[in-house]
């Protein structure tokens, strides 16, 4: 008997058993990511029906739309108190708009969701990025965490767990204290 593949087979069987017993653990929304020359991952996104390409960035605290893309898909933008910055830049005052619907692969959510809008030209037009994919926005940790996303680097895919929305709110919801 050959036990060389035992760890892989055991992991596969355990994973199948978990999904069979707890079907909500299955990551049904599987979206392949495109990797650019620098190893950055991008996915196709539709915001209010408008197609775009977004960087998947778990290190970005907020999801951001490029100002040009936002003009195509958000009808009204207002000034925001939020100041955002990226590596090597000064903080910039963002604008806000409302997203009524967002679709990342086959993962579709209806809002309203607050959208932060910035001019991403400094990133898109950096000399080192001339051969890479132009981004219309950034999917940040706020969206990834709220929607139970998993970045699968082995298969280079973004996965969403069905029904995971709101898990952070459920976890942090104040619970009543019972006294005898």
Image (cartoon, grey):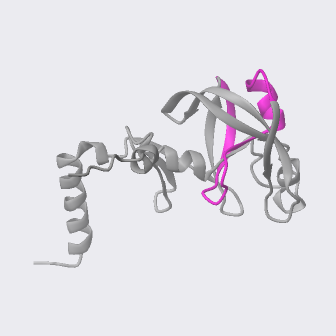
From this view, report whether residue 41 is shown above or below residue 75: below
| Viewer-side residue, 135 vs 91 | 91
Q: Name the residue at 20% across, 73% down.
A: 6
Magenta span of residues: 49-77
| Relative horizontal placement of residue 85, taking residue 99 as reference (left or right) | right
| Viewer-side residue, 70 vs 41 | 70
From this view, report whether residue 13 is shown above or below residue 25: below
**Residue 75 on the magenta segment:** yes
| Relative horizontal placement of residue 141, taking residue 175 as reference (left or right) | right
- Tell me which corner region of the image, top left, top right, bottom left or bottom right, holds residue 97: top right
Q: Name the residue at 82% across, 58% down.
A: 129
**Residue 24 on the magenta segment:** no
Task: Return the x and y of residue 177 as percentages of the image width and height.
Answer: 32, 50
| Relative horizontal placement of residue 71, taking residue 22 as reference (left or right) | right
From this view, report whether residue 129 is shown above or below residue 112: below
| Viewer-side residue, 26 vs 63 | 63
> Can you say which quadrant of the picture contains the N terminus?
bottom left
Q: Residue furthest left?
A: 1
Task: Return the x and y of residue 37 as percentages of the image width and height.
Answer: 71, 61
Q: Name the residue at 78% across, 33% down.
A: 69
Task: Return the x and y of residue 15 as percentages of the image width and height.
Answer: 25, 57
State the count of labels.
Answer: 0
Q: Residue furthest front?
A: 180
Task: Return the x and y of residue 100 as percentages of the image width and height.
Answer: 62, 24
């Amino acid at each position: 008997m050959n036990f060389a593949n035992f760890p892989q087979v055991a992991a596969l069987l355990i994973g199948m058993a978990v999904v069979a017993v707890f079907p909500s653990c299955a990551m049904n929304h599987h979206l392949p990511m495109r990797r650019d020359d620098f190893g950055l991952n991008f996915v196709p996104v539709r915001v209010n029906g408008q197609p775009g390409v977004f960087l998947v960035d778990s290190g970005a605290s907020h999801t951001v739309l490029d100002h040009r893309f936002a003009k195509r898909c958000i009808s009204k933008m207002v000034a925001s108190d939020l100041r955002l910055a990226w590596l090597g830049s000064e903080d910039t005052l963002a604008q806000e708009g409302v997203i009524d619907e967002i679709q990342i692969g086959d993962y579709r959510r209806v809002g309203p969701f607050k959208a932060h809008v910035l001019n991403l030209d400094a990133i898109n037009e950096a000399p080192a990025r001339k051969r890479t994919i132009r981004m219309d926005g950034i999917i940040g940790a706020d969206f990834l965490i709220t929607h139970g996303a998993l970045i699968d680097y082995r298969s280079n895919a973004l996965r969403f767990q069905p029904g995971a929305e709101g898990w952070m709110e459920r976890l942090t919801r104040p619970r009543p204290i019972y006294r005898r």
